[in-house]
Image (spheres, grey):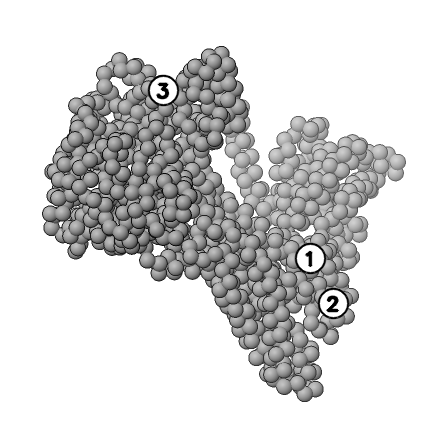
Amino acid sequence: MARDTSDLLHGTLDLLVLKALSWQPMHGFGLTKWIEERTRNELEIVDSALYKALHRLEDNGAISSEWGISDNNRRAKYYSITTRGKQLLRAEVATWKRYVAAVSGVIENA
Amino acid sequence: MRQFSSKLPAGIRHLFRLPPSRERLLHDMDEEMRIHVAMRAAELRAGGMSEADALVEAQRRFGCADDFYDHAKRRASQRARKHRVLEWLDEWQQDLRFATRQFRKNAAFTTLAVLTLALGIGANTAIFTVVHRLLLDPLPYRDGNRIVLLTVQDADGGPSPVSSGAVSVWRMRAHSFEMIAGVSVDGIAVQDRAEQDTIPAYITSNYLSVLGIRPVIGRNLTIADERGENGNVAMITYGLWQRVYGGRPSAIGERANAAEGKSYTIVGVTPPEMGIPMTFDQPRPDKLHEATPSIWVPASLDSIGAGGEVFGLLRPGVSAAQASAEMQSIVDSVRVSVAGGLVARPASCCARALRAQDLVEPREARAIEVLFVAVGVLLLIACANVANLLMSRAWARRREFAVRMALGAGRGRLARLVLTESLLLALAGGLLGIAIAWETLRVIIALRPPALANLADIHLESTVLLWSTGVSIATGILFGAGPALLAGARSIGDVLRNETRASSGDNFSRRMRSGLIVAEIALSLVLLVGAGLLVRSFVTLLDTPLGFDPHNLIAADILLPPPRIMPREEKPAVERAILERVRAIPGITDAAIGTMPGAPYHEFGSFETDVASDGQSRSVPTLGVVFMTPSYFRVTQMSLRQGRLPDSTRWQQPLSMTDPAAPPIEVVINQTLAHRLWPNGRALGATFGSTGRGRRRSFTIVGVVNDVRMPGTSGDQPTVYQMPLAIEVPLVARFHGSSRGLAETLRKTILATDSRTIPRAFTFGDDYVNDALAPTRFAMALLATFALVALVLSAVGLYGSISYSVGQRTREIGVRVALGADARAITGLVVGDGLRLAAAGALIGGIGATVATRTLTTMLYGVTASDPLTFAAIVVLVVGIALLAAYVPARRASRIDPTEALRAD
């Protein structure tokens, strides 16, 4: 069952958003779907939290936004990753891997 | 495929880098949420959900809407705020970039403006450094602003000695002071091991604490030392320690032998800044063996008593005035209780705050003040010049400004641009100015006015740099204000309408520019008149016969020990022996007892003539007395105008001064005294005597000698020359050949004649005259330089302004030429404009100068502050330069080709 994501670390959500946008620019709903598919619905994220993450990243200059037209002809706001965002993503991924390795090490060897 | 909206608003906003407004952001986020919910609902419906259920589920999955709104509001406000700051910085950066680009494009204008400002700011910084160091600083001690000199005045307002009784009641009762310390220097000299004369000073054990200094090595003096419990101990100065003890730490514990069989155990060495703030007289490199205290002997405050100086260290927060009031009330109360017993009834008591200024000779202090004002004026001229340049430019740029305003730039924004430009210019000028200040300071040090001789380490300090930064910014605002006003004042329509028919500028700008030029000329004229007066004084000084010949003249002071060491009867013989031995030195052609002419001498109190030749007795308040042997006038090359020399046999009767039965003392007087007492010229043979109480000294005039004329000396004061009394031996000698080593030879000869004497203060006549002229020379050289710079700046300003207006009036002049005006008429027209400004400036400046030059009175010599010749010459000079500055553009105007001029624009 889906889990409450309030305890999901900000950093984790940011990481997911950046990773998604590194493939291609997306609008908010598309991004939700992308994450739901990739995480096989393991993480059900409250949609507003995702938007807050998007806004936070945009204010930090990691992503930028622009209004556009969606595939089914709806007006939507598209987000795309910036150069700064790509740098941030690389750093976050490295941190995350170290974190996972450390935690896994504890769990498996204990 | 994603398609971008081609709708205009956002695109244009982006193009112009305009920030989305707060409302816009909120609206965006709201829309984003609605779209998201709609998309989610559509997806759910596609999955088979009913319309209503889909919407509810979509909203549930989005989360709390209110919470999202709060987030949106916070974010919108934050972004808007951040954007305002960014926008401001961005605009400012644009202004800066634009300004630098403008300046690079107009290299000539920029160079001229920056150079002008640099001169103004540089001169200011240099002089402020001196002012700061000499006049504003408190005493150069840790708590210098809390050190006060305790003084008392008698009923006549004259200074009176501070009695030890008063000091002890102050010390007991006054709460204003943290400490009271005393110091006294007496005439008894001790001789150190290197046979160099040293003067001991008596200090209380807390003296160093009052000055806020500590011993370099060893210990400070203590109360026990004051009481003599540790035997004869003393501290020595840093100089003596270096000179005699080679700076060895082992000097502590050694004995410092003194005259009268006394010797002191050295317990400590005082730091170099040790001194006596009132008579602070650091050794000068040009004077050998200057006598300053070298040994600091402990003494109690009571024993220092009336002969010394008493200093107090105020408690923090207590003012000198409060301390004075407390001292007064304590003395008054004691007088009541002791009924006139203990205290010598001082009329008023005063704790006088001491400043570094107290150590500066008044003429030099005045010179520095005058220079400070002068550089201020110079800076004003520089500002006026740059303001003028900027206003001309602002006028030339009116089309640019009009276009900017038409495109929506506010007046504030334009004014800011102009101010940014001014500030940028000012800062560049300030930076270059600091470099100029540095060089100027080196020149000032090279000129070395005596007060600055102690300050060879003078340098640009942080306070001073702060000052010049402040000055730069102030000037930026000052000369930026005109152009900024001008930029703000113009309306778009006016400019665009007038653009095609440019005539001679608008009235406001033209009047303002003319006003600036007139002000510049007036200010330059004031400076030039001041400088002119000083130059004339200096030339007069150099031309005036001094009344003696300083060249190849050397003087020394020889102290004779007290009677216990050298009985009175012996002294005349010692004096004569010294004179004979000195005369025998090879290279010395002649010698006499006497001081360097005009040098400080003994002063006697009031005198009056017995009966002047017109039957009335006259009085002279004070008389200078020079003790000399008859050869003195020959040695110094002074000339006896009337009568004869005193009878040299009288020399053998040193006690005749106090012997009422002795015949009148034969004296020679100077011309000033002769004219003062006997205006009809019958001084010879007259007698006069002191009006003092008790025994009356009587003098007979046997001769009249010329006055000594030197600035800052007492040479032209009423002076009496009489035979020596053998108390101390001033010596003057004439030599030929090199002066090298002469002082040392003299010193050795004197000591070889009698080792009990203390020869000191060797001075060469040329140095002596040089020092006397130094304040005038210093003030003159700098003021003349500043005044000439001011003149050049004003001329450049006038030239620029006239050139500019010729450029503006090209069409008008073209019309005149077309209508038959010849070249001369055109030249006259333009030069006439310049002349009008110059005349107005000269008139205002002339009036200003009559007031301003009064402050120079004490520094003038041989000219009055309103010397008509100087005024006339300077007015001619200024108007002449102004005509020249106007003539060049006038010539250009006269060559204007009417057809081209009319085709222009």
| The quarter of the displayed image where residue B17 is located | bottom right
Residue at (74%, 48%) from the top-left corner?
B20
Residue A23 seen by the camera: no
Q: Position of residue B827 (x, y in %)?
A: 60, 79
Q: Are marks 3 and 1 on the same chain?
A: yes
- Tell how many labels: 3
Pick the residue in front: B343 or A52.
Answer: B343
Q: Which residue is the site of mark 2?
A: B495
Structural distance between the alpha carbons of marks 2 and 1: 15 Å
- Residue at image position (27%, 31%) is B660
Q: Which residue is mark 3?
A: B301
**Real-space Cα separation, disc 3 to disc 1, in angstroms:** 67 Å
Say which amino acid is labelled 2.
Val
Residue B333 in the image: state x and y as whole percent. 51, 15
Q: Which residue is mark 1?
A: B485
Rendered-image quadrant of the C terminus of chain B? bottom right
Looking at the rendered image, the disc whose residue lies closer to the viewer, 3 or 2, is 3
